[in-house]
Image: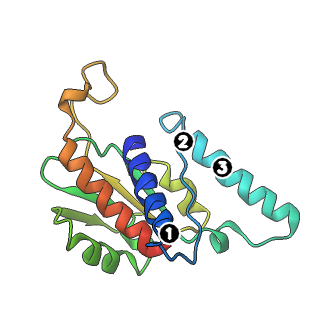
Amino acid sequence: GTAALLEIAQYLVGQKIEGQLNQTRDLLFAAWSGEELGILGSRAFVAWKSGSEAASGSRPLEDKVSAYLNLDMVGRLRERLSLQGVGSSSVWRRQIEQRNVVVGLPITTSDDSYLPTDATSFYVAGVPVLSAFTGIHQDYHSPRDTAEKLDYQGMEDISRLVALIARSLA
């Protein structure tokens, strides 16, 4: 997920430098830690942003953050990419369909927005979420999860899809 995040950021910054990204919204790229211990990083960020807004009398987080795109375990595309949280916004289905035309990934969608991942921190705060996931595998959180088992083409395709969605939202 972090590698995909960095690729997406590099692509979108390149688009901006070349004058090909006419955005009306800012993009924030962040990687969290402590997900398996209780989504600690994302929860701390949401609490910090929500707390600082409340203290200043500013708008709530959901009024400032248009969407949260999450990349969780996207290195082993097998049959289909799972896009979860589709029910959190009426724009997701159209965005997925339109942006995937040029990528061509096999996709399964799920409306469920309360997920066992960092997306939950944002969803609970009222922010629409979309989480990309390729599924649990037998090497999950073990030393057997090595680089040669990654699906690099799949990761590239997933990164491209999420980048196109992010670009459209911006």
Residue located farthest toward the top when viewing the structure as drawn = 143
Identified at 72% across, 56% down, the residue is 49
What residue lies at 50% left-to-right and 39% top-to-bottom?
35
Whether residue 20 is visible, yes or no, is yes
Tell me the residue at 31%/22% (across/down).
Answer: 142
Mark 3 and mark 1: span between their CA atoms?
16 Å
Q: Which residue is mark 1?
A: 128
Coordinates of residue 166 in the picture (x, y in percent): 43, 67
Q: Mark 2 and mark 3 in contact (Cβ < 8 Å)? A: yes
Question: Going by the image, does 65 lie left or right of 74?
Answer: right
CA gap, disc 1 and disc 2: 18 Å
Query: What is the secondary structure assignment of the residue under circle 2?
Result: loop
Residue neighbourhood size for the residue with mark 2, other residues' Cα within 10 Å, grouped as few (<14), some (14–19), many (≥20): some
Q: Position of residue 29 (x, y in %)?
A: 53, 53
Q: Which residue is mark 3?
A: 45
- The residue indicated by pointer 2 is 32
Task: Name the kind of residue labelled 3 in the image.
Answer: Phe
> Measured from the top left, where is residue 25 in percent x and y?
58, 73
Towards the viewer: 46 or 31: 31
Q: Which residue is outermost to the right?
A: 56
Name, please, the residue furthest toward the left: 79
Residue pictured at 27% horizontal, 78% vertical = 98
